[in-house]
Amino acid sequence: MNVQEIMNSLEAKHPGEKEYLQAVHEVLESVKDLYNENPQYQAAKIIERVVEPDRILTFKVSWLDDKGEVQVNLGYRIQFNGAIGPYKGGLRFHPSVNLSILKFLGFEQIFKNALTTLPMGGGKGGSDFNPKGKSDAEIMRFCQAFMLELWQLIGPDTDVPAGDIGVGGREIGYLYGMYKKLAKEHTGVLTGKGNGWGGSLMRPEATGYGNVYFAQEMLATKGDSFKGKVVAVSGFGNVAWGAAQKATELGAKVVAISGPDGYVHIPNGMTNEMIDYMLELRASNNDIVAPMAQEFQGVTFHAGKKPWELKVDIALPCATQNELNGTDAQKLVDNGCILVGEGANMPSTEEAIDIFLKNKILFSPGKASNAGGVATSGLEMSQNSARYNWSAEEVDAKLHRIMKDIHAACVKYGTQPDGYVNYVKGANIAGFVKVADAMLDLGVI
């Protein structure tokens, strides 16, 4: 496999899809040696097949706003690779949604889902619809119109969407209600459902908790723990909330959270009251963290800045793709940061990752350390199939076990001769091997 030749071919076929091409390049660089040592992969053209989606659905979503005016958005569903199970991946409702972002997310999802060891393929979808500032009635009408286009292409054994940015419990409820009406059945076709109608306990916290559990395993390889560590977290959605909560429980001092307006510095660390307030901020439908500085004494707001300028031991980027660049990475390294755990999907640029690896700090890619969310979605699918609910303690224990197993797989494939664990390489190879072997077993389809 010649990585540059493959990338040149992809860039010619998919010009301008920078997020997708970035994700593919990272995986190819990690697996090239393994791939070239296994002629069966080359003969079956595994790389050429895995980098292209099985299918892409693009559709128009027409809906009425509260003024009775017709609005039109674009909707997407990308079924990327179903070699090891039904397509599985979230729906994102955000103005930034485009084909490149969804292809990057779907491609990453293939290997993330494989790492969980659960039988789930990779997919993604969403719309450029912006739920911010919309009434519940408008969101309901949009979700119903969106599902009207999607419902015949998904199913509990075919494709199981979930939530993502802009798609929380409210949106999942509206989407599932319309699916149930159209399909005339009550099945586990969406995850992130309400606890009273098929959802799993612990799902909102799962991605953030899983990120911290993975970081806990990384620290343990150095005989260390979260106790007494200073932590910065970006974002204030479900992932950041769960990460801040679990890190605090483990004895860390979380000194920052952020939004698109800037970040708040909390010198004495977040309290339980502040963590609860994050839920109120999210419910207010505003992507801003500034109110925390007004609500709590000693908290300062830094407009337009990122928390990575602070002196911290641990950085947990939990917001969005490419939020942490090379300059940010160098600041973290210079300030003595020992661990970066990605809670979002690909939040670090390639330049930033190179800096972390060059300086041999503990760094985990999102496909490994943020897999707790989709792992718990997989557990929800299992509960739906069995018509049974596990307790929060049971789900948390299973989640913790899955994250430990993902960490072990990364160590197995990512340990270098000098003992340093390249978690990027380890995660990519572990996920790739499982998917590639399944594709070989299934033949050319």
Image (cartoon, rainbow, N blue to C red):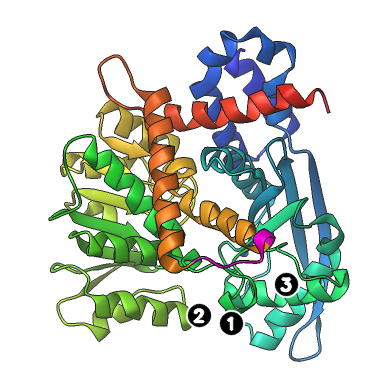
- Real-space Cα separation, disc 3 to disc 1, in angstroms: 22 Å
Q: Which residue is mark 3?
A: 176
The x, y position of residue 371, in whole percent, is: 49, 48
Q: Nearer the viewer, residue 264 or 240?
A: 240
Q: Which residue is mark 2?
A: 285
Find the magenta span and give its range: 385-390
State how many labels appear: 3
Q: Amino acid at mark 1?
A: Gly
Sequence-first tag of 3 and 1: 1
Sequence-first tag of 3 and 2: 3
Dots 1, 2 in contact, CB < 8 A: yes
Quadrant housing the C terminus: top right
Q: Which residue is mark 1?
A: 133
- Real-space Cα separation, disc 1 to disc 2, in angstroms: 7 Å
Q: Secondary structure at mark 2?
A: loop
Quarter holding residue 81: top right
Q: Nearer the viewer, residue 39 or 92?
A: 39
> Residue at 51% of width from left, 26% of height from top?
429
Q: Secondary structure at mark 1?
A: loop
Magenta segment's dominant SS is loop
> Residue at 83% of width from left, 55% of height from top?
153
Quadrant housing the N terminus: top right
Q: Amino acid at mark 2?
A: Asn
The x, y position of residue 15, in whole percent, is: 69, 35
The x, y position of residue 181, in whole percent, is: 84, 76
